[in-house]
Amino acid sequence: MPQTHYPAELLARARRIRLACFDVDGTLTDGHLHFDQDGREYKAFHAQDGMGLALLRKNGIEVALITARRSRVTENRGAELGLVEVHTAAHDKLAITNDIAARLGIGMDEVAFMGDDLVDLRVFPHVGLAVAPANVHPWTAPHAHWITPQRGGHGAARDVCDLLLVAQGKQAEVLVSFGMGMTQ
């Protein structure tokens, strides 16, 4: 069930966000790594997450994918979504996040970062909004500002997107763009 009420402190953090960065495995996917007998990688992405990322971009929030794993599948998904900032084999996620924000003229307090495991912890204290999916590793969870209701690969990224759109007063505008709230 979608969350309709957010704590005031969370909304205040989300209101400032201009760049949303997402780890991939465990956040945009369920964390399972699938390989066929020839070593080709397969991932499953949730369509609602993709819609959420597109809505962020349409509403002025830049989106970046930053993953420690080298992955053609991730690169392809980023290209399909029209993302310019897709970083695979990113072993220093903080440096990449800082670089993207600096190039865009965005302060780190205006950055959201979603991650699920220890490799993401280094970024969390430096961003305005650190988010983890419901399936976050227990050592990572205490360092997030918010844990989404959904698990990674099951709509967790959409939870973040919806939070940002609600906090920034864009929900009604998004609904109107899809024909809701318009008079017939």
Image (spheres, grey):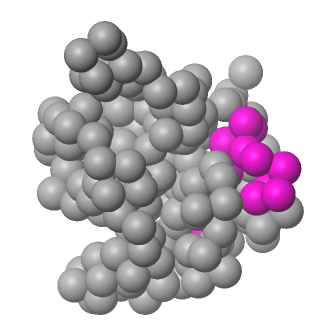
Question: Is residue 78 or residue 111 the one in the foreground?
Answer: 78
- Specify whether residue 63 is in view: no
In the picture provided, is 112 more to the left or to the right than 92? right
- Residue 2, by quadrant, is top right
Residue 112 on image: x %, y %: 52, 66
Question: Is residue 63 or residue 26 the one in the foreground?
Answer: 26
The residue sitting at 74% across, 38% down in the picture is 134
Question: Is residue 110 or residue 30 the one in the foreground?
Answer: 30
The residue sitting at 56% across, 47% down in the picture is 160
Residue 10 on image: x %, y %: 73, 64
The residue sitting at 25% across, 22% down in the picture is 40
Question: Compared with residue 39, is residue 116 higher up or lower down, i.e. above or below?
Answer: below
- Residue 183, by quadrant, is top left
Residue 28 on image: x %, y %: 47, 36
Residue 165 on image: x %, y %: 49, 51
- Specify whether residue 104 is in view: yes
Residue placed furthest toward the front: 37
Total numbered circles: 0
Image quarter hosting the C terminus = top left
Q: Which residues are magenta?
A: 129-141
Q: Main secondary structure of the magenta part?
A: loop
